[in-house]
Amino acid sequence: MITCGIEIKGSEVILCLLSKQDGLFQIADCRQTRHTLNNPNDSESVRKFQFMLKKLFEDYKVKRAVIRERPTKGKFAGGAVGFKIEAAIQLINTVEVDLFSGAKVKDILQHNPMPIPFKATGLRAFQEGAFTVAYAALSEHIPEA
């Protein structure tokens, strides 16, 4: 199952495609790892942005998207455009979308540390947040029902 880790910075989403099979993590190539919402006040622009992400998820057979959650208040609070992007992603009905807080990611990484340093992944430095949230999502122990 391919998981897409997403970090939102301003009006931009940064993506990292990651899968886990037989305990091994595999980073999938992605045609474009950065996407910008050019005109967040135009509904047609938001629709095109959402459609482009939905198409990317379909093309790469992404089953789950995990967004690095941004605080709503305080020094590091996300902006209005970022929350609009988050909502557009959450409304894509072909993938399961989860939000992971920084505390949740930190807790998961404490119990399941990354087996290699980020620099050894071959990803670009700006993808670290997206990779980390995808890794945390795939490392999370889901309790048995």
Image: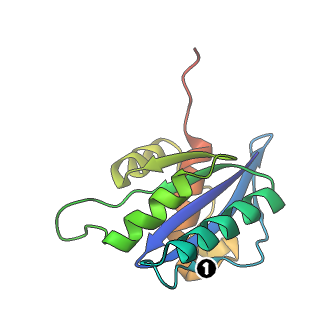
- Check the image and report above or below for 136 versus 12: above
In this rendered view, identify the residue nearer to me: 65 or 54: 54
Identity of the residue drawn at 42% across and 65% down: 84
Residue 69 horizontal/vertical position (percent)? 39, 56
Rate crowding at label 1 as few (under 14), some (14 to 19) or many (20 or more) other CA atoms within 10 Å.
some
- Check the image and report above or below for 33 versus 1: below
Q: Toward which corner of the image does residue 50 lie, by quadrant?
A: bottom right
Whether residue 24 can be seen here: yes
Drawn side of residue 97 relative to residue 99, left or right: right
The figure's colour scheme reads rainbow
Residue 25 horizontal/vertical position (percent)? 73, 53
Q: Toward which corner of the image does residue 125 lie, by quadrant?
A: bottom right
Q: Which residue is mark 1?
A: 34
Tally of marks: 1
Residue 126 horizontal/vertical position (percent)? 53, 80
Identity of the residue drawn at 67% across and 65% down: 51
Residue 20 horizontal/vertical position (percent)? 74, 47
Query: Type of residue at label 1?
Result: Arg
Drawn side of residue 46 relative to residue 31, left or right: left
Identity of the residue drawn at 32% across and 70% down: 80
Drawn side of residue 114 relative to residue 28, left or right: left
